[in-house]
Amino acid sequence: MVERDYDRISVRDILDRADTGRSAFYAHFRDKDDLLLASSVEYLRDVLAVPLPPDPAAPPDSERLAPVHRLLVLAQQYPEVYRVLVGRSTGGTVLRSMRDVVERLLTEQMAGRLEVAEQDFAATIAFLSWGVVGMQAAIADSGGALTARRAYDIVAGLLSPAEP
């Protein structure tokens, strides 16, 4: 996807690059979108499982939105990848797939952290996932002007109770 637009990559291109056959591919994935989603979820789960080195700018792990910061840090660390995945020129299919990835990860990471009714949790995570993807795009497209910490502070500020 760094070499050419996702929409121009065919399953045949993937098979050739992976040196595998069509039947093996379809035994595991419905289509290239399914591959993108599955591989992204697994990769990000692995990344999120590794503890970060101490960072005074990071919120403490006990903070309710700390998993959001971790996802924003990835966009700061790998802006060229995130420009492809969620940037201004990203196609709708890839963008929706990445939002699905973020939603799955936030569902796992945010369980027990949010003070919302159980029946509202899924809708809250859906809302939050679009916000995270938007902030990842802003970080990746900013050329370093928007940091993960600043993006996190914006998100946290929007989700904080209003001051009386």
Image (tube, grey):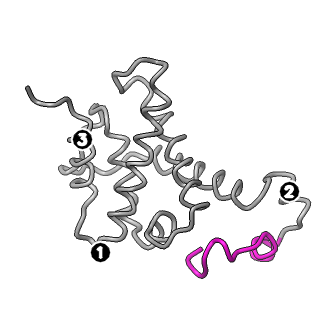
Asked if residue 135 lies left or right of residue 12, the reply is left
Q: Is residue 11 magenta?
A: yes
Pointer 3 residue: 158
Amino acid, disc 3: Leu
Seen at 56% across and 54% down, the residue is 96
**Cα–Cα span, label 1 and label 2:** 38 Å
Residue at image x 51%, y 65%? Answer: 85
Comes first in the chain, label 1 or label 2: 2
The amino acid pointed to by label 1 is: Gly
Span shown in magenta: 1-19
The amino acid on which the numbered mark 2 sits, given as a three-letter code, is Tyr
Pointer 1 and pointer 3: residues touching (CB < 8 Å)? no
Q: Residue furthest right?
A: 23
Q: Secondary structure at mark 1?
A: loop
Measured as percent of width and height from the top left, residue 91 is found at 56, 67
| Circle 3 residues within 10 Å: few <14, some 14–19, many ≥20 | few
Which residue position is annotated with label 2?
Answer: 26
Please tell me how crowded label 2 is: few (under 14), some (14-19), or many (20+) other residues with Cα within 10 Å.
Answer: few
Magenta stretch encompasses residue 8: yes
Q: Position of residue 163 (x, y in %)?
A: 10, 30
In the picture, measured across the screen, residue 30 lies left or right of residue 79, that is right
Dot 1 or dot 3, earlier in sequence? 1
Q: Residue at x 21, y 47 (%)?
A: 153
Task: Look at 36% across and 26% down and name the residue there.
Answer: 114
Residue 162 vs 151, above or below: the answer is above
Q: Judge depth for marks 2 and 3 and give the one in front.
A: 3
Is residue 127 positioned above or below 83 on the image?
above
Which element is circle 2 on? helix
Q: Disc 3 on helix, strand or loop?
A: helix
Residue 143 numbered mark, or none: 1
